[in-house]
Amino acid sequence: MASSLYKTYLIVSAPDYNREIFEWNPWVYVSWRDDGRQHLHQIRFTLEKFKTTEEAEKFGINAGKMWVDGRLRGLVSTYQSVSLLNFG
């Protein structure tokens, strides 16, 4: 598990190990406070797979940062997954 504080958002990357294919799938949790309320957004990736937990954690942190940036720019809503964005 890896975490990062990014622009007042806490990003936690907690990959899930798939024992059937021996690879890691990224799971990301983004939390923040807004108007005195705590919010949590979960992003699950099913197509992205990694051989090591470190690779999956790094991907998850970067994806969380992209989601935060998209949210701050008004490109994604609180309930929209980062996987809908173009990673390029």
Image (cartoon, rainbow, N blue to C red):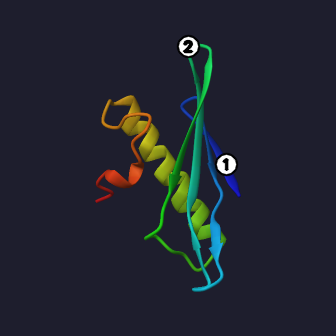
Task: Please state the horizontal and vertical placement of residue 16, each as a whole percent of the image.
Answer: 64, 67
Residue drawn 59% across and 46% down?
Answer: 29
Give the crowd class for mark 2: few <14, some 14-19, many >=20 residues within 10 Å: few
Task: Please state the horizontal and vertical placement of residue 47, each as a whole percent of the image.
Answer: 43, 70
Residue at the bottom extreme, as displayed: 21
**Residue highlighted by disc 2:** 35
- Answer whether residue 9 is visible to the viewer in this image: no
Task: Please state the horizontal and vertical placement of residue 78, each as a whole percent of the image.
Answer: 44, 34
Q: Secondary structure at mark 1?
A: strand
Residue drawn 54% across and 31% down?
Answer: 7
- Answer whether residue 42 is visible to the viewer in this image: yes
Task: Please state the horizontal and vertical placement of residue 86, each as a whole percent of the image.
Answer: 29, 54
- Residue 14 lies, with reference to residue 75, above or below; the image says below
Task: In this rendered view, identify the residue nearer to me: 54 or 13.
Answer: 13
Please tell me whether mark 2 or mark 1 is closer to you in this view: 2
* Three-letter amino acid code at the position of disc 1: Ser
Q: Secondary structure at mark 2?
A: loop
Q: 78 left or right of 18? A: left
Q: 47 left or right of 19? A: left
**Residue highlighted by disc 1:** 3
Q: CA distance from mark 2 to mark 1?
A: 23 Å
Residue at the top extreme, as displayed: 35
Q: Quadrant of the N terminus?
A: bottom right
Q: Which mark is residue 60?
A: none
Give the crowd class for mark 1: few <14, some 14-19, many >=20 residues within 10 Å: some
Residue drawn 32% across and 30% down?
Answer: 74
Q: In the picture, residue 18 is in which quadrant?
A: bottom right
Counting residues from the start of the chain, the first of labels 2 and 1 encountered is: 1
* Three-letter amino acid code at the position of disc 2: Asp
Q: 27 left or right of 48? A: right
